[in-house]
Amino acid sequence: MTEYLSLLKSKTKLKKVVATLSDKQISAVIANLQSILTSREQQRAESARKDAEKREKVADFLNQLKAAGITPADLTSKPTSSNKG
């Protein structure tokens, strides 16, 4: 794995390896790498969108609680019963 990474990161080494490939083959490799990069970028964008949506929902929920006079501490405290017996 380290050898592959070293190869991909070194222009000189990469040039030697692809010397026997046709321009069409090199273009296909580039297209594959571009596809992988595009997919990663889309996944990151989707993840960021979902995170932002979740933060917005949490903020809305906290605002609703605040408007109702409920604090986050109220949600974790044990309820007290006023109807004993």
Image (spheres, helix red, strand yellow):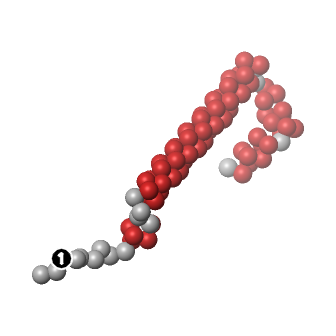
Q: Is residue 60 visible?
A: yes
In the image shown, does 40 or 17 lie closer to the viewer?
40
Q: Is residue 72 above or below residue 13?
A: below
Q: Is residue 28 above or below residue 7?
A: above
Q: Quadrant of the C terminus?
A: bottom left
Name the residue: 82% across, 27% down.
Answer: 19
SS for dot 1: loop
Q: Amino acid at mark 1?
A: Asn
Residue, far bottom: 85
Residue, far top: 24
Residue, far right: 12
Q: Is residue 42 left or right of residue 12?
A: left
Name the residue: 76% across, 20% down.
Answer: 22
Residue holding disc 1: 83
Q: Quadrant of residue 70?
A: bottom left
In the image shown, does 9 or 63 lie closer to the viewer?
63
Q: Quadrant of residue 43?
A: top right
Residue 28 in percent (x, y) is at 68, 23
Q: Is residue 29 visible?
A: no
Q: Residues within 10 Å of mark 1 (few under 14, many from 20)?
A: few
Q: Is residue 29 above or below residue 61?
A: above
Q: Is residue 12 left or right of residue 76?
A: right
The number of callouts visible is 1
In the image shown, does 21 or 67 lie closer to the viewer?
67
Residue, far left: 85
Q: Is residue 2 above or below residue 80?
A: above
Name the residue: 51% across, 44% down.
Answer: 53
Q: Is residue 29 left or right of residue 75?
A: right
Q: Is residue 9 left or right of residue 39?
A: right
Residue 20 in percent (x, y) is at 78, 26
